[in-house]
Amino acid sequence: MVEQAETLRRKPLSRDGVLRAAVALADGTGIESLSMRKLAQDLGVVPMALYKHVANKDELLDGMIDVVVAEIDPPVPDADWKAAVRKRILSARQVLRRHPWAPLAIESRTMPTPAVLGYLDSMVGTFRAGGFSADLTHHVMHAMGSRILGFSQELFDASRRAGRSGTTDPEPPTALPPEAAARFPHLAEIAAAASHDEASVVGQGCDDQFEFEFALDLLLDGIERLRQQGWTSSHRSR
């Protein structure tokens, strides 16, 4: 981060330079530390110089999101839809793991940024090119939710939401207390089933990457079956 900031200081200030410096700052110290004053300090300029390139902090955050989303691998033309979708989602996940503040920043926007809209549009295009109807694609995008962008709200580990801020590493979930385990035996059972040996390369708790890919593959396989069946929303049971 220090070397990147030094390089940016030597160049004339530009919108791209401001956004990339803001991304580097958020990567290094968390999104909570980001302010126009701190960013100006890192760039070696007065705060007012930033406003020539971004109108306010909201515009800064939008631009930062677009910088991050631009790192996702582009779509592969003429590829099998399932392989193409899986590859891009896992690429998005790698990108967001490099920028752990980005998922919450994306969720905080009242409107998706241009880069996010472009990414989503290209994913819809991949489904459509793979033989999906517009109706099925609509429901698929709902089912995928934020997973289409490489992240998901974890059901059993609320600390992962805090971990996205970049301030702390998420801790593995702990076992249910005995009284809770007795009251909720099925939850206790799957909590125990998800635990790994202490010697495991991922440590105790759930392997986050494995769980993400497991759910992603379940969704993709189910979506393919619906496509083959010619599913439409009129098939819903009433």
Image: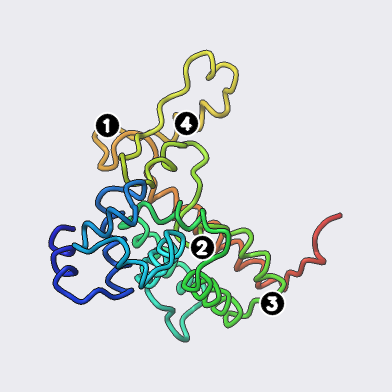
Q: Position of residue 40 (x, y in %)?
A: 26, 60
The amino acid at mark 2 is Ile
Which numbered mark, 3 or 2, is in the foreground of this view? 2
The amino acid at mark 4 is Ala
Mark 2–mark 4 Cα distance, whole angstroms, equals: 26 Å
The amino acid at mark 1 is Glu
Q: Which residue is mark 2?
A: 148
Mark 3–mark 4 Cα distance, whole angstroms, equals: 38 Å
Residue drawn at x 14%, y 58% is 2
Q: How are the residues colored?
A: rainbow
Q: Which residue is mark 4?
A: 191
First of labels 2, 4 by sequence position: 2
Q: Residues within 10 Å of mark 3 (few under 14, many from 20)?
A: some
Q: Which residue is mark 3?
A: 133
Describe the element under mark 3 as helix, strand or loop: loop
Mark 1–mark 2 Cα distance, whole angstroms, equals: 32 Å
Q: Which mark is residue 198?
A: 1
